[in-house]
Image (spheres, coloured by chain):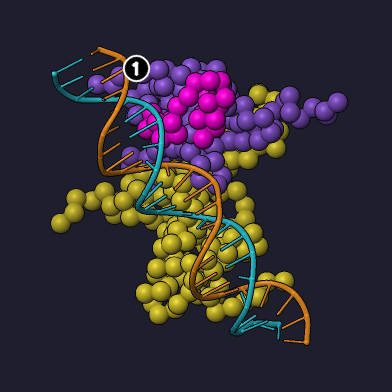
Chain colours: A yellow, B purple, C orange, D cyan
DNA sequence: GTCGATGCAAACAGTTTGCAACCAC
DNA sequence: GTGGTTGCAAACTGTTTGCATCGAC
C-alpha cells in the first residue's frame, strides 16, 4: 500500500507540468531550487515506485541515464522528441505494430515488445533564430 | 590515424564471433579468460574509437549499460533480439521509414532519426525445454 | 500504533581520465 | 623517432542500500 507523502506529490506535480523527460538528478535539483527539499535517494526510490504503479514513462538517454515523464496513456504509443528543446510528442504506433507482427512471425519470435525512439528537430527549433 | 594493436584486433575478433551484444565488462572478462590480457580501460577506449570509425553498433541495456556488436551494415536496419538467449537478428526497416516520414511531416519535425528496439522470445527458446 | 517513506552516509556499478611506459608505423 | 595506444590507479557519475527516524493512515 503506497502512501501519498509531500515528496511524492511534489515529484508528480513537477512532472505533470513538464513536456520533457527529466532525470532523477534534474528532478532533485529543480525541487530543491523551488524550496521543496528532498533527498536524492528519495527521488530515486519514488521514481522507481511510481514507475511500477502509476503513470510514469522511463527512457534512457544516449549515455545511459534514466529519464522520466508523466504519461498516463497505457495503450501502445511512442514518442517523437526534439533534440534541441527536448519536447516530447506522443504518437500512436498502429501501423508499426502490423510491421512488427509480420517480422516476429517471419523470424519465429513470440511475445515481442517494441520500443521506438524517434528524435528530430521540432518546428519551433528549426526556425532561424533571431 | 588509428593503429591496429593486438588488443583491438582481439576485441574485433571476439565480436565477430558473437551474435549477441556484449558489454565492455563482458568483453574484458571473456578476453582475460581466453588468455588475452587487456586492461578494462583499454576496452572502453577501443570500443569508443571503433564505434566512431568501424562497424560497431551500440545499444543500451535496460539498466543503462552500453552493449556492443559488430554490424557493418550501414543502411537503415534494426534488431530483433531474444530476451532469453540474446541472439540478435537484423531486420530491414523500410516500411517503418515511411511511417516515420509521415509522422515527422505531420508534427513539423525535421532530421528525424529512428531507433527501434524489438525484443521477444526466439523459436529455439520458446520450445518446451527437455 | 503500525508500517511504509525519508534522510544521510556509505557502498556500488559503469565509465572516464592523468600520466608514464610502450609499440605500430 | 613520433604519436597513437596501453596499463594502472584514481576520480567521476548515476544509482542503490543499511539503518535510525519520521509520518501517513
Whole-percent x, y for residue A62 in the image: 42, 44
Q: Residues within 10 Å of mark 1 (few under 14, many from 20)?
A: few
Whole-percent x, y for residue D15 in the image: 53, 55
User: Outermost residue, right direction?
Assistant: B130
Whole-percent x, y for residue B29 in the image: 54, 30
Check residue A90 for magenta coloring: no
Q: Quadrant of the N terminus of chain B?
A: top left
Q: Residue at x 45, y 58 (%)?
A: A23
Kindly identify which residue carries mark 1.
B4
Q: Quadrant of the C terminus of chain B?
A: top right
Q: Is residue B103 left or right of residue C1?
A: left
Check residue B44 for magenta coloring: yes
Chain letter for the residue marked with disc 1 in the picture: B
Pick whichever, B24 or B107, lies toward us: B24
Q: Main secondary structure of the magenta part?
A: helix
Quarter-wise, where is residue A74 in the image? Answer: bottom right
Q: Residue at x 40, y 68 (%)?
A: A29
Pick whichever, A87 or B97, lies toward us: A87
Whole-percent x, y for residue A67 in the image: 47, 55
**Image height of D3 relative to B66, above or below:** above
**Image height of A68 relative to B108, above or below:** below
Q: Is residue B34 left or right of residue B54?
A: right
Magenta range:
B25-46
Amino acid at each position: 500500500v503506497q502512501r501519498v507523502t509531500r515528496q511524492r506529490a511534489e515529484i508528480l506535480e513537477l512532472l505533470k507540468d513538464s513536456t520533457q523527460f527529466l532525470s532523477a538528478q534534474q528532478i532533485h535539483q529543480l525541487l530543491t531550487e523551488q524550496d521543496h527539499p528532498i533527498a536524492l535517494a528519495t527521488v530515486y526510490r519514488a521514481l522507481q515506485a511510481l514507475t511500477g504503479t502509476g503513470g510514469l514513462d522511463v527512457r534512457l538517454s544516449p549515455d545511459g541515464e534514466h529519464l522520466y515523464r508523466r504519461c498516463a496513456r497505457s495503450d501502445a504509443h511512442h514518442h517523437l522528441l526534439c533534440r534541441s528543446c527536448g519536447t516530447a510528442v506522443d504518437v500512436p504506433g498502429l501501423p508499426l505494430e502490423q510491421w512488427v507482427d509480420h517480422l516476429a512471425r517471419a523470424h519465429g519470435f513470440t511475445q515481442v515488445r517494441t520500443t521506438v525512439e524517434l528524435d528530430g528537430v521540432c518546428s519551433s527549433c528549426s526556425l532561424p533564430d533571431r
